[in-house]
C-alpha cells in the first residue's frame, strides 16, 4: 500500500517541480525516490495485508510484480535523461515525468487489486497516461496517429471491460474478486448466462490490453509511432502489468469456469503465436519488429493462463523478468542507434559490429535472450511455461509454441546479420554512460537468471 501512495506522491512532486522550477533535479530525485520505494516494497514480502476495505491487497504476487515494475520504471527514468535532452522536451520534462509516475501507479493497482472497481481504476490510470505519452511528439504525424489509435481502441476495450464487470456484479452482487470466486465455485455447474457473457467480455478486454490476436492490430502502429522510450515502456511495464492482472483475474474469479472460455483462449494463443512470429519475419522497421515480437511473447505468456491448474505464477514471473531485461537492453541500444543514424530501420544497425563492437555484442545477447537461446533468462522462462502447459494437457499448444520459437530465431537473426555482415554506416554511434550502465545491468541480470533460474521458480 505504501508503495502505491509514495509513487503517487512522486507523481505529484513532478507536477510541482514545474511550478518551483526544479526541472534540473527532477529525474535524480525520482530515481532516488523509486529506489527507496523499491526497498520498502520488499518489506511486504510474506506480510499479506488488505487496504481500503479489501479493495487492495499486499501479497507475494503483488510484491514480486511491483518490484519488477519499479525496476523497469527506474531504467526508463535513467534512459529519459538523455532521451529528453532537446530544448523542446526539456520544457515539458516535469509533465512527462509526472505522467510516467502515474502510469506506474496504474500498474501497481493492477498487481494488487482485490476488487473489480480497483482493477478498472488501475487499467484506466495506466491507459490514459499512455494515451498522452504515445502522442507526446505533437509535431510528428506518426506520434499523433499512435496516440489517437491507442485512445480509440483502448476506449472500446475499456467499455467491454466495464460492461463485463457490470454484468458480473448484477449476478453476484459483489465487486470483490474473492466474492466472485466464491459465487463461481458454488454455481460452477449452473452458471447464469449473464455471468458467462460478462466473463467473456472481460476476457476480450484483457486480450486487447495484452495485445493478443485477434485484438493485436493496434500494437505495431502504436509502437512505431510512439516515442521510442515510450515504446520500451509499453512493451515491458504495460504488457507485464496487463498479464499479471489477467492472470489474477482468471485464477481467482474464473478458474472454475475456464471451460466456457478455454476454446477462445486457446484459439487466441495459437493465433498470437503464429501471427506474431510470421509477420515479424517481413518487418524492416526495428520498432515494428519488436512490436510483433511482443505479440509473439504474449502468446507464450498466455500458456501460463491456460495452465492455471499448475503453479504457473512463478513461471510467469520468471518469464516477465527475462523478457523485460532483454527488451530494455535492446531498446536502450536502439535509442542510441536511432539518434545517431536518424532512421528506425534495421539497416541502421548495418556494420555495428565494426563501428561499436560493445553495442553489437550487447544487442546480440539481448536478441538471443528474446529468442529463447540458453544460457539467457529467456530460455528458462519459456522452458518453465512450456513445462507447465505440457503437464496440464496442452501438448499441441506447446508443440506450436516450440515451432513458433524456431521461427522467431530467424527475425532476431536479421538484426544480428545486419550488424556483422553488412557494410558499416558512416555515422558515429556512441552511447552515454547512463545507457551503457542500463545495458550492462540488464544483460547481467538476464545471464544470472539464465544460470540460476531456481531463484524464481519457487518464489510465488
Image (cartoon, grey):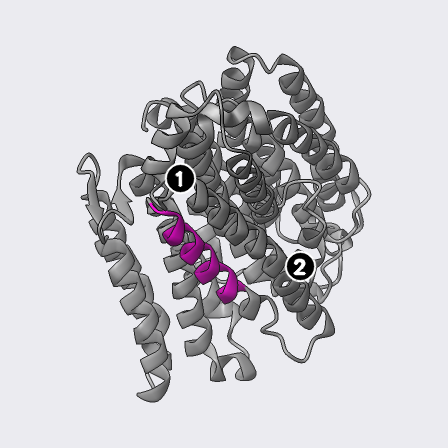
Task: Find residue 42 and report its image quarter.
Answer: top left
Report whether residue 181 is seen. Answer: yes
Give 173 or 110, whichever is nearer the viewer: 173
The residue indicated by pointer 1 is 172
The residue indicated by pointer 2 is 222
Q: Secondary structure at mark 1?
A: helix
Report whether residue 443 is seen. Answer: no
* 1 vs 2, front mark: 1
**Quarter of the image that includes the C terminus:** top left
350 relative to 117 in the view: left or right: right
Residue at (29, 42) in percent of width and height: 63
Give 400 or 224, whichever is nearer the viewer: 400
Residue at (33, 81) in percent of width and height: 17
Question: What count of labels does the image hold?
Answer: 2
Residue at (68, 50) in percent of width and height: 352
- Residue 139 appears at what percent x and percent y? 67, 80
Start-end of magenta stretch:
115-130
- The image shows residue 125, relative to residue 169, as above or below, that is below
251 relative to 7 in the view: left or right: right
Most common secondary structure along the magenta stretch: helix
- Residue 354 appears at what percent x and percent y? 68, 49
233 relative to 9 in the view: left or right: right
Amino acid at each position: 500500500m505504501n508503495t502505491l501512495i509514495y509513487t503517487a506522491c512522486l507523481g505529484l512532486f513532478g507536477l510541482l517541480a514545474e511550478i518551483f522550477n526544479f526541472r534540473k533535479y527532477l529525474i535524480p530525485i525520482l530515481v532516488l525516490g523509486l529506489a527507496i520505494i523499491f526497498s520498502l516494497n520488499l518489506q511486504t514480502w510474506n506480510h499479506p495485508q488488505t487496504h481500503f476495505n479489501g479493495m487492495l491487497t499486499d501479497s507475494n504476487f503483488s510484491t514480486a510484480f511491483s518490484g519488477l515494475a519499479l525496476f523497469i520504471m527506474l531504467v526508463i527514468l535513467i534512459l529519459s535523461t538523455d532521451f529528453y535532452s532537446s530544448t523542446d522536451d526539456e520544457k515539458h520534462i516535469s509533465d512527462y515525468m509526472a505522467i510516467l509516475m502515474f502510469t506506474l501507479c496504474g500498474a501497481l493497482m493492477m498487481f494488487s487489486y482485490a476488487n473489480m472497481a480497483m482493477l478498472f481504476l488501475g487499467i484506466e490510470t495506466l491507459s490514459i497516461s499512455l494515451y498522452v505519452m504515445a502522442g507526446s511528439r505533437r509535431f510528428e504525424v506518426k506520434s499523433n496517429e499512435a496516440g489517437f489509435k491507442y485512445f480509440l481502441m483502448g476506449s472500446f476495450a475499456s467499455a467491454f471491460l466495464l460492461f463485463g464487470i457490470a454484468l458480473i456484479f448484477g449476478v453476484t452482487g459483489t465487486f470483490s474478486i474473492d466474492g466472485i470466486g466464491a459465487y463461481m465455485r458454488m454455481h460452477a455447474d449452473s452458471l447464469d448466462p449473464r455471468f458467462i457473457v460478462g466473463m467473456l467480455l472481460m476476457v476480450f478486454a484483457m486480450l486487447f490490453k495484452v495485445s493478443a490476436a485477434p485484438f493485436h492490430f493496434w500494437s505495431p502502429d502504436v509502437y512505431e509511432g510512439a516515442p521510442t522510450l515510450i515504446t520500451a515502456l509499453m512493451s515491458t511495464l504495460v504488457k507485464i502489468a496487463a498479464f499479471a492482472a489477467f492472470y489474477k483475474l482468471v485464477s481467482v474469479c474464473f478458474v472454475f469456469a475456464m471451460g466456457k472460455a478455454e476454446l477462445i483462449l486457446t484459439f487466441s494463443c495459437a493465433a498470437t503465436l503464429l501471427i506474431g512470429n510470421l509477420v515479424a519475419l517481413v518487418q524492416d522497421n526495428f520498432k515494428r519488429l519488436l512490436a510483433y515480437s511482443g505479440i509473439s511473447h504474449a502468446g507464450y505468456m498466455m500458456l501460463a493462463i491456460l495452465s492455471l491448474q499448475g503453479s504457473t505464477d512463478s513461471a510467469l514471473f520468471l518469464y516477465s523478468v527475462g523478457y523485460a531485461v532483454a527488451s530494455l537492453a535492446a531498446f536502450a541500444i536502439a535509442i542510441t542507434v536511432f539518434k545517431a543514424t536518424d532512421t528506425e530501420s534495421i539497416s541502421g544497425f548495418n556494420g555495428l559490429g565494426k563501428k561499436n563492437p560493445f553495442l553489437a555484442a550487447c544487442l546480440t545477447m539481448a536478441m538471443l535472450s528474446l529468442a529463447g537461446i540458453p544460457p539467457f533468462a529467456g530460455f528458462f522462462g519459456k522452458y518453465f511455461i512450456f513445462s507447465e502447459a505440457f503437464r496440464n494437457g496442452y501438448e499441441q499448444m506447446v508443440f506450436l509454441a516450440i515451432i513458433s520459437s524456431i521461427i522467431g530465431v530467424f527475425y532476431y537473426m536479421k538484426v544480428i546479420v545486419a550488424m556483422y555482415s553488412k557494410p558499416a554506416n558512416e555515422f558515429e554511434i556512441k552511447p552515454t554512460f547512463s545507457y551503457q550502465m542500463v545495458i550492462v545491468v540488464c544483460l547481467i541480470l538476464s545471464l544470472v537468471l539464465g544460470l540460476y533460474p531456481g531463484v524464481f521458480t519457487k518464489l510465488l
